[in-house]
């Protein structure tokens, strides 16, 4: 009985400790921003890793999500004789929700896990300690460019996802299901608001980008430096990254569109 | 070195692609391209009942959108709704006896304000008030009137 209480207390304290370490790491990352601006080449390499390498999966998923949305939306809307609203439905769901959320989930799986594994292995093979020996701060040199690379890539990837998804919905809705071409676009333009919908979607994706890369970097940096520890950290990145994105999405949606 | 260069080119293409996608969302998907009214001037209108009129609802004349609803507030001394309209500044020749009505787009669509021009040669100035207004049609009232009329006819028979 007492043992289980002690275990509970220990795990609670451990969780608090990890939370504290994560925030200290974030503070360190943000402090590294000025030195990153001096060496933008590091950022370019990380935008390549997180952004460019994720374009294909994001674009293909966006296309299919848009196409499926058009098919399913058409089924429901046609029961009310409101097929003309198909464009609005597809664009609103993509720009407001699915674009940022699904992109963040894909990035957590595709790039976040890679970041965790990379940093975890650096730690396991004592490259991070090596950097410290050479008086190079590993947080500033290794983590800062990766964090800002993810932060920069996410909104662009989400915008690509939404844009490709709208085109996919257009192909299915107009090409396959016979919704009128002009009505599809004009209804969409009449109902989708630049500030309300598009900007809020971009803000969401920036927040998700920060959350996902922060979690990925911290799991890697905090991993137990063994092969098993790195594999666990990679799993945790995907699981807690996805949960954080979905939880934050609810909070942000309630704040932005709640009233 | 050439590998670094390829990477830089790909990153550049990625950034450009992302901004093209954002541009596409702004211009083609959202209403930025339709937002041609720009700067406007305010006009006020009092209604007994604005129905479900919303802020940013269109203000049209002859079916063409010339402005938007800027704000809706309640006047507690006269128990009326005061609607502020933002009219595009190029439409500065609205006669002072213009009639403002709240209409509904389609059967169940959104409500908007339709302006019917009067015959006066004098024009509205910024901040003026439209005095001739017609409230929104409330569906329940219409149905109620119809039912009373029907009941009256049945009783007369």
Image (spheres, coloured by chain):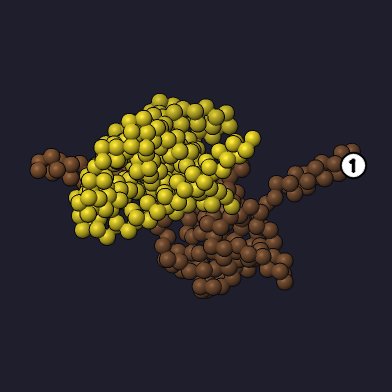
Chain colours: A yellow, B brown
- Mark 1 belongs to chain: B
Furthest residue in direction front, as rendered: A2
Is A95 placed left or right of A143 in the picture? right
Furthest residue in direction left, as rendered: B1
Is A120 placed left or right of B121 in the picture? left
Q: Looking at the image, which residue is at 45% across and 46% down?
A: A18
Name the residue tied to disc 1: B156
Could you tell me if residue B19 is visible in this image? no
Of the pair B90 and A4, the residue shown nearer to us:
A4
Q: Secondary structure at mark 1?
A: helix
Q: Residues within 10 Å of mark 1 (few under 14, many from 20)?
A: few
Of the pair A144 and A196, the residue shown nearer to us:
A144
Q: Looking at the image, which residue is at 66% across and 54% down?
A: B51
Of the pair B11 and A167, the residue shown nearer to us:
B11
Q: Looking at the image, which residue is at 54% across and 73% down?
A: B127
Position of residue A238 relative to residue B14, above or below, is: above
Q: Looking at the image, which residue is at 26% across and 45% down?
A: A128
Is A21 placed left or right of B142 in the picture? left
Could you tell me if residue A135 is visible in this image? yes
Report x, y in % for residue A144. 30, 51
Question: Which quarter of the rendering shows the N terminus of chain A?
Answer: top right
Report x, y in % for residue A61. 37, 31
Position of residue B102 relative to residue A55, above or below, is: below
For residue A112, which quarter of the picture? Answer: top left
Report x, y in % for residue A214. 38, 46
Report x, y in % for residue A181. 40, 35
Of the pair A159 and B45, the residue shown nearer to us:
A159
């Amino acid at each position: 009985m007492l043992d289980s209480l002690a275990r509970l207390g220990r795990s609670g304290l451990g969780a608090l400790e990890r939370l504290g370490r994560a925030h200290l790491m974030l503070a360190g990352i943000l402090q590294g921003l000025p030195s990153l601006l001096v060496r933008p080449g590091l950022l370019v390499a990380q935008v390549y890793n997180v952004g460019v390498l994720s374009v294909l999966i994001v674009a293909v998923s966006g296309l299919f999500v848009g196409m499926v949305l058009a098919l399913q939306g058409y089924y429901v809307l046609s029961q009310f004789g409101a097929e003309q609203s198909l464009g609005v439905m597809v664009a609103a769901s993509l720009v407001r929700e699915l674009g940022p959320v699904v992109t963040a989930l894909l990035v957590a799986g595709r790039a976040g896990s890679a970041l965790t594994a990379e940093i975890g292995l650096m730690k396991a093979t004592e490259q991070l300690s090596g950097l410290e020996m050479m008086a190079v701060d590993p947080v500033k040199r290794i983590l800062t460019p990766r964090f800002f690379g993810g932060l920069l890539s996410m909104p662009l990837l989400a915008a690509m996802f939404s844009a490709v998804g709208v085109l996919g919905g257009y192909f299915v809705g107009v090409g396959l299901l016979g919704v009128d071409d002009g009505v599809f676009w004009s209804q969409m333009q009449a109902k989708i608001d630049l500030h309300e919908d598009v900007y809020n979607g971009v803000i969401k994706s920036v927040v998700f980008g920060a959350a996902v890369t922060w979690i990925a970097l911290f799991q890697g940096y905090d991993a137990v430096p063994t092969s098993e520890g790195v594999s666990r950290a990679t799993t945790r990145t995907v699981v807690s990254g996805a949960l954080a994105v979905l939880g934050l999405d609810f909070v942000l949606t309630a704040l932005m569109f709640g009233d | 070195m050439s590998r670094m260069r390829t990477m830089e080119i790909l990153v550049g293409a990625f950034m450009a692609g992302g901004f093209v996608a954002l541009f596409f969302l702004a211009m083609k998907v959202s209403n930025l391209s339709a937002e041609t009214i720009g700067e406007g001037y305010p006009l006020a209108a009092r209604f007994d009942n604005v129905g479900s009129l919303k802020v940013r609802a269109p203000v049209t004349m002859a079916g063409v959108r010339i402005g938007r609803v800027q704000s809706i507030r309640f006047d507690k001394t006269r128990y009326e709704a005061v609607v502020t309209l933002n009219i595009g500044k190029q439409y500065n020749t609205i006669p002072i006896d213009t009639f403002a009505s709240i209409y509904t787009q389609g059967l169940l669509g959104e409500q908007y304000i339709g302006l019917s021009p009067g015959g006066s040669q004098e024009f509205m100035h910024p901040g003026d008030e439209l005095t001739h207004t017609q409230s929104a049609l409330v569906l329940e009232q219409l149905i109620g009137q119809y039912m009373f009329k029907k009941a009256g006819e049945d009783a007369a028979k």
